[in-house]
Amino acid sequence: MASFAKIGLNNKVIEVLSVVNEVLHDSNGIEQEAIGIDFLTKLTGYPVWKQTSYNTHGGIHSFGDTPLRKNYAGLGMIYDENRDAFIPKKPFNSWILNETTCLWEAPVAMPINDNKYNWNESTLTWDISEV
């Protein structure tokens, strides 16, 4: 199955639909995003769609294939035309967008140990989780 994100106002993802892969094939059997967009436009009457890959996260495809648009699109994410990427909502004001992964990162790396941590925006530190 191929997935497509419906893009609304301010490039916000408002829906994600799946399409059977064969629908996307051209006369040579090659998958084409434009064919999927045409199919969904005719089906829904809505014209703005971008293909997304369930197997892409942080600019890496989980099976080693070519990653698509940095991250799998989810509701509320933003499609950034300049980066051709889906970007999640910024979780905290202090976090910085990693241009390679198009994911948000804390300004301080989370400690790597057996503890669980929560980000503390007021102190800009990782606090050990009580849960």
Image: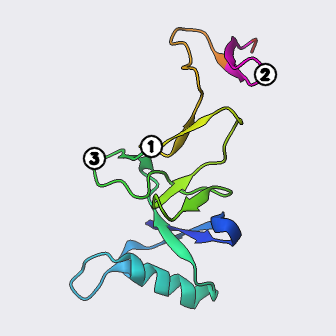
Question: How many numbered marks have been drawn onto this rendered protein structure?
Answer: 3
Q: Is residue 78 above or below residue 97?
A: below
Q: CA distance from mark 2 to mark 3?
A: 39 Å
Label 3: few (<14), some or many (≥20) within 10 Å? Answer: few
Residue that carries the numbered disc 2 in the rendered image:
122
Q: Which residue is mark 3?
A: 64
Q: Earlier in the sequence, mark 1 or mark 3?
A: 3
Mark nearest the camera among 1 and 3 is 1
Residue 27: horizontal and vertical position, in percent?
Answer: 25, 89
Where are the magenta residues, as a range?
118-129
Q: Is residue 14 visible?
A: no
Secondary element under disc 1, as helix, strand or loop, is loop
For the point 55% across and 91% down, the residue is 42
Q: Quadrant of the N terminus?
A: bottom left
Q: Amino acid at mark 1?
A: Thr
Residue 50 part of the magenta segment: no
Using the rendered view, name the quadrant where residue 13 is placed: bottom right
Q: Which mark is residue 101?
A: 1
